[in-house]
Amino acid sequence: MVLNDLGKKISGALLKLSKDYSFDESLLNQVLKEISLALLQSDVNVKYVKQLSDNILEKFKMEEGSATNIKKLIQQCVVQELTMMLDSKKQPFSLKRGKPNIIMFVGLQGAGKTTICAKYANQWKKKGWRTSLICADTFRAGSFNQLYQLAMKIRIPFYGNITETDPVAIAKEGVKIFQKQNYEVIIIDTSGRHMQESELFDEMKQIYSAFCPSECIFVMDGSNGQACFNQAQAFKKAVDVGSVIITKLDGHSKGGGALSAVAATESPIIFLGTGEHIDDLETFKAESFVRRLLGLGGMIETVSEVVDLESQKQSLKLIAKGQFTLRDLQQNYKSILKMGSLNQFISMIPGIQNINQGQISQKEQINKIKQSLIIMDSMSNDELNGITQITQKQLFRISKGSGQPIESINQLIQEHRNFARTLKKLIPSIKDCDSKTKKN
Ligand code: GDP
């Protein structure tokens, strides 16, 4: 994600504080200047940048006397202020089990709405919800086929009608069918529209009032930067935008502008689109996002949504003690498969954002993980728990049991050692992360 540059620049500015022992207000001003510049370069609105800088200065002055670690205090202020900027304070809508939750997607044409509908559907399906997709976009010629193809790929029921020109009629029919079949998440993709296109805006209002959807999600193209502010306001005025998804944050330095423009909707950001692939979707939690951006880790908050929090905490404690077994690797690999993305997992581990990126494709990484899990399934409990060593004899047994070549097993054992070594180096930041969860 290009926003990583912002994280690196802010972390770089904060690093100055740890190097300089004779800390004074002029050094703080210099650091704040660098942080502000980094935010402005990421297209964050100048008003928010000024506010953030003023607030940090004020907090610093208030707490200076009692603070023992100036760097930590400033780091905390930066995290708090950036989090406040990105946090709408509103709770996102939570889907209700056993009920038809109708979710309507709106946004400008080309924002990535259709792609996001499929990504969003896929992640609910993965969590075990009965999910369906409706194409009510009668404006863009290719949208029916695009959503149909995506729905087939992720094996989610689809409804659309290429001969019908009234989107309200299509949506009504689709909702009727899926409601009857007890679908819990019914997603409606609507036509993309520009804020000047009043007809299309009226059509969007009609669909909205025909269903009063459980949630209306505004999809915003992150590469539009601050221009998103006016669009977001126009959509908010027309329909009750409940939450926001920002797309295309994988390739654009204007991401900061889009993120801060969300304030115009007064609605929480729920996901970020970070690529064209179906799994390129990240859950958004403001503080976790900011911490990750600054390389401070944000693992627990996000991973906990898909994996057992208690076992993660236990695992982190053992890693902090320098113990990372094949069993831990197995558990983490299973979590990655649940999340569907290795890069997403890696980016949540403090300090190791850049490992493995760009070397092999996401698909290859996932296939490799699947192969490793097959191998580990053929290991005994003692081997997985690091109680017995894997000797030549055991290698043959595992190879026979898993149907995988000896070289792949040796490669996995080597990878486990490398991973354990990397994690051991990260003990301080992992401990930070652990103590943070205890406080929560
Ligand atoms: P719609 O008109 O709003 O429905 O937009 P589409 O879903 O058709 O997306 C428009 C283009 O953006 C397509 O080429 C998508 O593959 C691409 N796209 C969508 N989301 C992302 C994303 O998160 N990152 C990148 N790089 N491209 C995306």
Image (cartoon, rainbow, N blue to C red):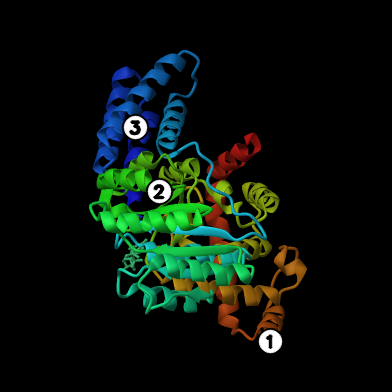
Q: Secondary structure at mark 1?
A: helix
Q: Is residue 416 left or right of residue 43?
A: right
Looking at the image, is mark 1 or mark 3 earlier in the sequence? 3
Give the Cα separation between the discs numbered 1 and 3.
Answer: 55 Å
Looking at the image, is mark 1 or mark 2 earlier in the sequence? 2
Q: Specify the amino acid type for callout 1.
A: Lys
Q: Secondary structure at mark 2?
A: loop
Give the Cα separation between the discs numbered 1 and 2.
Answer: 60 Å
Q: Residue at x 69, y 80 (%)?
A: 398
Give the Cα separation between the discs numbered 3 and 2.
Answer: 46 Å
Quickly name the residue at label 3.
16
Question: Is there CB contact under 8 Å for labels 1 and 3?
Answer: no
Q: Residue at x 49, y 36 (%)?
A: 89
Ligand 1 rendered quadrant? bottom left
Which of labels 3 and 2 is toward the front?
2
Quickly name the residue at label 1.
400
Q: Is residue 173 left or right of residue 5?
A: right
Quickly name the residue at label 2.
239
Q: Residues within 10 Å of mark 2 (few under 14, many from 20)?
A: some
Q: Position of residue 256 (x, y in %)?
A: 32, 44
Q: Specify the amino acid type for callout 2.
A: Val
Q: Secondary structure at mark 3?
A: helix
Q: Assess mark 3: CB under 8 A from ligand 1?
A: no
Q: Residues within 10 Å of mark 1 (few under 14, many from 20)?
A: some
Q: Assess mark 2: CB under 8 A from ligand 1?
A: no
